[in-house]
Image: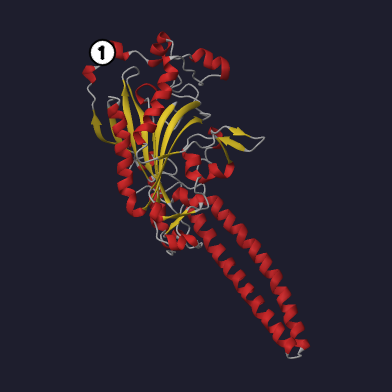
């Protein structure tokens, strides 16, 4: 969520940044008006509250002096102001709720360094590693759905019989391969990242905190009886581990990783890249996530990108690095580098890893703050929000990564995110 304080001092710059995404900026105008109204009503509420306190003192003083008439008059005024304060409090709370609800629907602002553009066609290819079109033989041009069926490692028909279309089933060496690739991703990052096995079902507020709700409700699996959501990515529970907490800056960057199953409904995807496992409802993924300070963010972002590239090189895969344009960024991301691997079987570049920087956007939604140890001990509301970096990387991108420009599901991934605890305590 964007910082509402910037609406008062930096509205034009915020609108210009949001416009780079191709988004409607009128929501920011409405948010600025709501913020103004809220501050105005809150000021009147605080004034009434202060007057009630003053009148309470006057009542005690008048009674001590034996001036009952003055005391009764002060009591009468205090009661009237008390009712007015209740009305103003309710009005201020309603405005604050409307403002927060509106800001929850507004995307993060692209970083200044993100390229301009409105679609995947505008993404910038920074470099290509290991790709030589002439080296692929006819045997390597066979699609993975044909290879999987021939080897008996991919059973799409029985997967569909059990659960419906786009629920693949891996067998024998295929099941071993999925597990081994996830283990490889965990092992390669165990030197710096703490492994977490979070729940697969989470509460609504957990999904809201990462920006998956309310915007992507149609793409998520919802267990209505218990009001729980099947996670679309381990980013969701990992991001919310520190929700409503204060992190000690001395403990940052805090690095976490998780291997989970992930679930996406793929609403509106009928007929698009549905052969094999290019697009599925359930998939395994390893997620890397780091909380960092603003000063640490550039270094941690570069580290996450290097780790993702290292895994692809270790697997001997040809890949390229893309700098996503403003119009192709995810809702919560300010800057994203995607790694795409070349899949000769379908002659496509497929996204294998996404390395994103979220600034303080998600941390503000989660109310995660950061400060020095002395401040953490008596954490106050003036502490600033944390920021996050995040990388999602898949372990078997050459065969089963997703097509470029598609925000749909993948069956295996290694994702990377970075959230930054940027501002110092006491700022704003």
The secondary structure type at the circle numbered 1 is loop
Coordinates of residue 304 in the picture (x, y in percent) = 33, 40
Is 117 drawn above or below residue 40 in the view shown?
above
Front residue of 78 and 62: 62
User: From the viewer's perspective, is 308 left or right of 234?
Assistant: left
Give the residue at x 62% y 69%. Answer: 45
Residue at the outermost front position: 191
Front residue of 27 and 197: 197
Front residue of 136 and 240: 240
Q: Residues within 10 Å of mark 1 (few under 14, many from 20)?
A: few
How many numbered marks have been drawn onto this rendered protein structure? 1
Coordinates of residue 137 in the picture (x, y in percent) = 26, 13
Give the residue at x 27% y 24%. Answer: 316
Coordinates of residue 315 in the picture (x, y in percent) = 30, 25
Front residue of 419 and 219: 419
Q: Which residue is mark 1?
A: 137
Give the residue at x 47% y 41%. Answer: 238
Coordinates of residue 48 in the picture (x, y in percent) = 64, 73
Give the residue at x 46% y 17%. Answer: 170
Residue 347: quadrant of the picture:
top left
User: From the viewer's perspective, is 73 left or right of 37?
Assistant: right
Chosen colour scheme: secondary structure
Answer yes or no: is residue 217 visible. Answer: yes
Residue 114: quadrant of the picture:
top left
Quadrant of the image containing the C terminus: bottom left
Answer yes or no: is residue 8 visible. Answer: no
């Amino acid at each position: 969520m964007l910082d509402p304080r910037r609406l008062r001092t930096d509205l034009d710059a915020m609108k210009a940044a949001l416009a780079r995404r191709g988004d409607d900026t009128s929501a920011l105008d409405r948010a600025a008006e709501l913020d103004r109204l809220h501050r105005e009503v809150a000021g009147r509420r605080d004034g009434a509250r202060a007057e009630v306190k003053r009148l309470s003192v006057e009542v005690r003083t008048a009674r001590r002096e034996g001036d009952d008439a003055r005391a009764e008059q002060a009591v009468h005024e205090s009661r009237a102001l008390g009712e007015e304060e209740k009305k103003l409090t309710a009005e201020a709370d309603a405005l604050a709720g409307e403002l927060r609800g509106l800001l929850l629907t507004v995307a993060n602002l692209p970083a200044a360094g993100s390229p301009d553009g409105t679609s995947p066609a505008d993404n910038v290819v920074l470099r290509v590693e290991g790709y030589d079109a002439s080296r692929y033989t006819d045997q390597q041009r066979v699609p993975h759905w044909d290879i999987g069926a021939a080897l008996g490692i991919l059973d799409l028909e029985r997967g569909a019989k059990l659960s419906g279309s786009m629920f693949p089933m891996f067998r024998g060496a295929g099941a071993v391969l999925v597990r081994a690739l996830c283990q490889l991703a965990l092992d390669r990052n165990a030197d710096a990242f703490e492994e977490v096995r979070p729940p697969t079902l989470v509460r609504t507020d957990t999904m809201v905190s990462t920006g998956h709700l309310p915007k992507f409700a149609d793409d998520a699996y919802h267990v209505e009886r218990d009001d729980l959501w099947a996670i679309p990515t381990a980013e969701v529970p990992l991001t919310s581990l520190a929700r409503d907490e204060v992190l000690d800056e001395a403990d940052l960057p805090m690095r976490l990783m998780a291997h989970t199953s992930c679930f996406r409904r793929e609403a509106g995807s009928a007929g698009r890249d549905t052969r094999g496992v290019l697009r599925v409802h359930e998939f395994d993924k390893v997620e890397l996530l780091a909380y960092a300070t603003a000063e640490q963010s550039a270094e941690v972002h570069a580290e996450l990108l290097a780790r993702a590239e290292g895994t692809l090189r270790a697997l001997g895969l040809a890949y390229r690095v893309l700098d996503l344009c403003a119009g192709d960024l995810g809702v919560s991301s300010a800057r994203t580098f995607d790694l795409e691997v070349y899949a000769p079987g379908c002659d496509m570049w497929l996204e294998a890893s996404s390395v994103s920087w979220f600034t303080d956007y998600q941390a503000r939604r989660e109310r995660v703050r950061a400060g020095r140890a002395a401040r953490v001990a008596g954490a106050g509301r003036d502490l600033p929000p944390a920021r996050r970096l995040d990388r999602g990387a898949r372990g078997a991108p050459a065969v089963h990564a997703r097509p470029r420009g598609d925000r749909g599901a993948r069956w295996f991934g290694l994702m990377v995110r970075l959230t930054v605890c940027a501002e110092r305590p006491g700022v704003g």
